[in-house]
Image (spheres, rainbow, N blue to C red):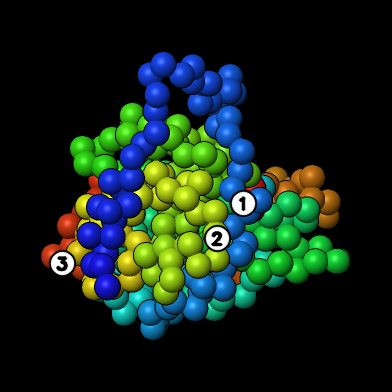
Amino acid sequence: MLSKSIWASALLAITILTTSSQAVKPLLTKDGHIDKPHLLDNLDGLRGGLEKYMKNPKRHVTKWGPGWISSDCKSFAVTRNFSISDIETYSVLYDDCASPWILCHHKHSPDPPAHFFENFGRIPVHARSYVRGAVIAPDPKTPGAYNGGDFIAVFTVQNAFKHQLGTFETLLHETGHSLDHHAYKPNGAQLSQTKEWTDAVTADAKVSDTYGASTLAENVAQMTVIAAYDVNVPGHFQKIEPKWRDIQNTLALMRKTQTDAGDLLIPSGMCTRRIENPKPLPIKRKVRRRSQLDVEADSDDELDLVESDTVLGGGPSRRSEMPDVSLAEGLEVIPPSKHGIEYRCEH
């Protein structure tokens, strides 16, 4: 059996077919889409193999006490017009890392917390280390996700007719955006913007799938999912896709890149480096207090709105102890991604 490094090198050695005398059609359209036919409609067919062979590690879950929310999840709730009181924050410690990830769950999400934490844990630890945290929330119509500054948000459909669970490949795709920006290539280079990636996409007969043709960045994220299948599932990608050679150059480059970066897509070992966790923030709510000048007033219009150091959902109460989100001693701190881009994806 070929070792994974030899296999990756052999694949990468496949000749990139370019002919200088032949007119080459521009790779990208004016709006940045990859102008190539699609090998697949979507990556749904990879789900079974990914979930079977990319096992999630054991975990210990601690729900944050009353009065606290992570800074990322608070920003998410405010931006998306969710009530902060509907967001539950958890410290999830997986047995492949000495420090927990801070994950949030909207209490009306159809995806139970345990299922969400299980899928997040399936992300190989060396790739997971480039993610600050994540949240899952409901949407009445459209499933989707985004990665903003290495924080992942996932939306699953919740309405009278559908109760949708989140999927592992969605989380892996969004992780791919973080890997693209500061893991796959050294010195902060973005893989999707390199000439070698453009050359590989140009040389292939097709592009991964419909969504992978959206932009070069989305192509890297989708190829992250395909490469994870290829390096973890017996028989590789070719076992389920007979026309896999139509994307052989991007697949070979992705395999080599993840290997060179430390086997990012293979679940093994312990975390050695992490992005710092988001900070815990106190939850304050506005409560009504009667004006001293209108002590006999009955209408809300004659009451003052003041911020009170109380716990949401109840009266005055002692806030629980502030959660500890510090990283374990000895972990190298990964600088946060500087791109600040939100990759909004429909899944």
Q: Is residue 160 visible?
A: yes
Residue at numbered disc 1: 40
Asked if labels 1 and 2 touch by Cβ distance under 8 angstroms, the answer is: yes
Local crowd size for mark 3, using a 10 Å CA cut-off: few (<14), some (14–19), many (≥20): few
Provide residue 151's location: percent of width, then percent of height. 45, 51
N-terminal-most mark, 2 or 1: 1
Q: In the image, 99: left or right of 312?
A: left
Residue 33: x and y in percent read 57, 30
Marks 3, 2: nearer the viewer: 2
Which numbered disc flags the more N-terminal residue, 3 or 1?
Answer: 1
Q: How many marks?
A: 3
Q: Give the residue displayed 53% in from the left and 25% down from the top.
A: 28
- In percent of width and height, residue 255 lies at 33, 54
Crowding at dot 2, Cα within 10 Å, few <14 / some 14-19 / many 20+, comes out as few
Q: Position of residue 35 (x, y in %)?
A: 58, 30
Q: Vertically, is 336 above or below 122?
A: above
In front: mark 3 or mark 1?
1
Q: Is residue 13 left or right of residue 302?
A: left
Q: Secondary structure at mark 1?
A: strand
